[in-house]
Amino acid sequence: MSDIKKIKDEYLLKLNKNLDLRQINQIKTDLFGKNGLVSSQFKQLGKIAEDERKKFASDLNTTKDELQDLISSKIDEIENKEINQKLEKEKVDITLPERPFVQGKIHPVSQVIDEISSIFSEIGFSVEEGPDIENEYNNFTALNTPDNHPARDMHDTFYLDEKKELLLRTHTSPVQIRTMLSDKPPFKIIAPGRTYRSDSDQTHAPMFHQVEGLHIDKNINMGHLKGCLNYFIKEFFEVDKIKMRFRPSHFPFTEPSAEVDIGYEIKDGKIIIGEGDKWLEILGCGMVHPNVLKNVKVNPNEFQGYAFGIGIDRLAMLKYGINDLRAFFDCDYRWLNQFGFDPIDVPSSYRGLSR
Amino acid sequence: MKITSNWLKEHLDTKLDENQIIEKLTDVGLEVESVEKQSGEFDDFIVAKILKAEKHPNADKLKVCDVDVGKENPVKVVCGAPNAIEGLLTIYAPPGSVIPKNQMKLVVSKIRGVSSCGMLCSESELNLSDESDGITELSSNDFKDKIGDNYFPKKNSNVIDISITPNRPDCLGVRGIARDLAAAGSGKLKKLEEKKSKQDGKQTVNVKIEKDQACTVFGSCLITDVKNVESPDWLKEKIISIGQKPISAIVDITNYIMLDLNRPLHAYDVDKIDKEIIVRNSKKDEKFKALDNKEYKLQEGMCVISDATGVLGLGGIIGGTRSGTELNTKNVLIESAYFSPRSIRKSSKILNIDTDAKFRFERGIDPLSIEQGLKKAVSLIQEICGGTASEFDIQKIENYKNKSLEFDPALFEKVTGLKIEKNEMTKILDDLGFEIKEVKKILDLKIPSWRPDISQEVDLVEELIRIKGYDQINMIEPQKLREKETLNKKQKLFHFLQRAVASKGYLEAITWSFTDSKINQLFIEKNKEIKIVNPISSDLDVLRSSIFSNLIIHLNKNLGRGFKDLSIFEIGPTFLGEKPGEQQTVVGGLKSGKNSRQNWIEKERLVDVFDVKSDIIQCLAEAGYDKDKLYFDIETPSYYHPGKSGRVFLNKGKEKVVAFFGDIHPNILKKLDIKTEALVGFEIFLDNIKQRKKSLKDQKTQYKFSDFQKSERDFAFILDKNFQVQELIDVISSVDKDLIKSVKVFDVYEGKNIQDDKKSVALNVTIQSFEKTLNEDDLNKINQTIISTVESKIDTKIRS
């Protein structure tokens, strides 16, 4: 029996015993180390007669491969076993609570302002702002509400001076005046913001939010006003059909003026917008009064258009089923958590206003 | 303005039922606010007869009555009235009915042991009169056959409450409302029937209007030998039907004419007038007692009606008690006048008086209704109270002329987008009382005297479209076209920061812009306090100087609700001055308590200044600012902890403070009685954040990176305790901007082995070249340069 065969048989036998990693590595050294049995055989290759050499080399290589494969597979086997044993010990209870994280929220009024801006953005309105403190001229006089006019009684005003020249704006309409005074027509803006009236009860807060709208161009008529508001209301409430009613009314700064009601019904204690035969007033609007245009140096014979004012808090209440206006400004942690929105929920037209 | 459809139908010939009328009113701009069953409470009261009245077994002053209420069996009622005697016809209120005077709902109850089924009513309890002694006595003749009937005739019309906009004084009378409905095709306006009344002789009370009066016309009529009585039922019912209280025939008649024709009148008891009537301006501090039983001190120049003695009344606003009519008044003078709206409004504002007359005059009464009002008053007074009437005396200092207006019908379509024929226009305008002449294509209109609101062409557009109906206007779909960006840079920053802060775990709050001055003082620093002249309450008396003024109150309220670990923020205005624009937009946040409280895996710890610092930096980074350029120092307002707070600039140039952050000063917590383990906060000032010139997309530089091996080296320096590590990092980074990729602080140590006034700061520096793999020599060189640079620029030593 050749040495090769002897080595092979002997070590195959050894390797098939139950060995640990150290023993296998010892065998590996015995065979393939510098002076290992197999390595030594290779060294003899030169001494072998030429006619036998080829066969010898072939046998030796085969044996080498066979033994090496067996050694590798043995090692793998042991390593796998060890890993599995280790993992078995590392088990955790994944039903334990996660690492803590905190989630912030966006106030519903802010969310609704973003929704409104997104809707009007689609039809070409840009956002303007104005200061919370206004002068009497911008808040009233320029808006065709002269002093000693009973229409001023419609607004309970907070004043900052005894002369009643400085006040907290009672509506967002002065932004119309500021915008038109600082630029040239056409104008197509919305102006959301804080507004103030010295009025406080269950349904009135001394501070609330309005969004003003203004569209002045050549030939903008009441048909455009109706179309614009109809589009807005449908988009805002995310319904296909909306029942809307324009009612004649009076605001000193628009003529003709209208109030807009939307249809609703109450189902299971919840308000459903767009159906039913009840009416809910949600905004005031009209064609900008020529006197207002004159006050801001816009020629009423050349330009005309509409304006509207919407109560934002009211819209938020209707859309998201919030009953109490006062709670908006109470900062109760529970309320903010319940009605607040995830900050990544940015209203947009392509992804939808709300989830 | 309250009306009933029955009253309306006295002026309007219509086939519409009440619901249709209500709908139509709203359609033409007379918004129906509410429709209430007309005093439904009056339906329950029944004519009854006391069959037997016996003394109450347990009470001396009470009687137990058997009362016939028209049913098979009489009912037992306990009654305390002395006049409750057998045989009396009176008014019975059954259980379940509500007594008008005190709104008490009756139930069957035991009174001193005897059960009483309902109650017998006095006139006062039914608001019929002030008579409260004893129960109502009905005349046997009139009522003996009516036992069991309702005492008050059943009403079949409701009270319709209409909200009249300030531009429509003409609709403050039922007739004006009827006119609008007629124009809108809901019926025909009936002709006013004019009863002829007998008038003899001149009005003998001299009336004089002084110069420059707000009263331009003063019409009057003297009626002598009248018998002022209670009003007849029809008149009382009318007055009651719209929720007012009948007083006496003369007062009721003047009220009725005001409600019916929107023509306020005033009645004087002539015998109380001293000689004459002078319409003049008040003198300073002149006093008079008004019919509301209050004494008013007048300012100079208010329009008063006076006699030789003094002020009788404030013209058009309120009469005085001195010359008021009473039941025994014999001779009355009826005033029908015109007062200018501005002056009425001014005087009533100053004196804070609100009356029905003032409400009408300040909106504008028909100046041509003077005689009409007198006529109707005279005929009604003579009909009810008798008497002899004088001729009318009309004093005027100004003649009224109808205004006229040229209207181009084309304007209608231009404004409304709706086309209507010209003859339809003229029909509507005619129905509304305009006199129309057509000149070429223009309508030349004479405006009715009762429409002070109409002065421009666009007013006519409104008249036409509201009568035609807003529903006729066709909608024009909006175009989806955007020519201008929706938000400007500042607005975008607002939205980014708002959502950035929220994404750090803060709940957004919205609080009032005003606050309590006492709390605001804690945060006001050197800013001006801005007071509200008429605050809604004393604890909301100033505009907030800081975003914390309200936020901290609400944080404390939430602590009170049992929450400990709170994070709230608000973004909004704070105020620097009382002029428009003197305000800032600030986002402020507060954080209290602990992170990871009672957590099995994370170690819990108090929130601290580095939590808010991290929030600020991350927010600014998210808004697009380079976080490595931010620069910090320690000058902060007094409401922050002086040693644990910082100020943030966008860069080393320290142009504008973009933020403060830190622990809230313990004194603030003490003063506001805030009980929490830790409280930190931050304020970011949006107006101080410089807008980037380039947009983010243009800021991206060329993509440059190195694949050569990077090395890390650690250093530790001994520094003064107060030395700011920011500078150390800055010095190291600037040793070689190309090679030094990052500098991390991994340890700050004070204590053993370090001098008391020193600290050891350990840093890890990453070094990598763009050109080659650095060998030991290169690295050593850089090491040396770092150490020598730091040691030369900063008073420090490398820790050996």
Image (tube, grey):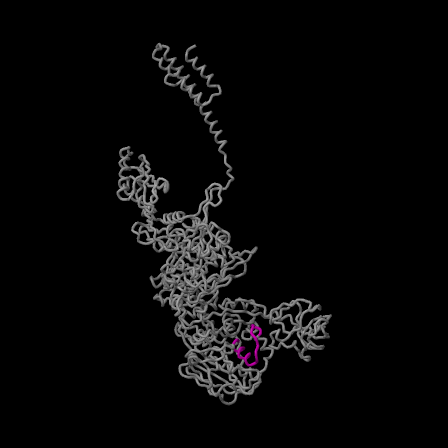
In which quarter of the view is residue A278 placed? bottom right
Q: Residue at x 43, y 15 (%)?
A: A8
In this orientation, which residue lies closer to the viewer: A222 or B340? Answer: B340
Q: Position of residue B784 (x, y in %)?
A: 27, 37
Q: Residue at x 67, y 79 (%)?
A: B139
Is B457 left, or right, of B252 in this rendering? left
On screen, residue B314 above or below A244: below
On screen, residue B383 above or below A129: below
Q: Position of residue B670 (x, y in %)?
A: 44, 55
In which quarter of the view is residue B777 placed? top left
Q: Residue at x 46, y 25 (%)?
A: A78
Q: Residue at x 44, y 78 (%)?
A: B298
Q: Which residues are magenta?
A: B240-259
Q: Can see residue B515?
A: yes
Q: How many marks?
A: 0
Q: Position of residue B325 (x, y in %)?
A: 54, 82
In this orientation, which residue lies closer to the viewer: A295 or B680? Answer: B680
Q: Position of residue B763 (x, y in %)?
A: 34, 40
On screen, residue B228 above or below A173: below
Task: Tell me if residue B246 is in the magenta stretch.
Answer: yes
In which quarter of the view is residue B72 placed? bottom right
Q: Can see residue A225?
A: no
Q: Main secondary structure of the magenta part?
A: helix
Q: Quadrant of the C terminus of chain B?
A: top left
In this orientation, which residue lies closer to the viewer: B221 or B511? Answer: B511
Task: Tell me if residue B432 is in the magenta stretch.
Answer: no
In this orientation, which residue lies closer to the viewer: B354 or A89? Answer: A89
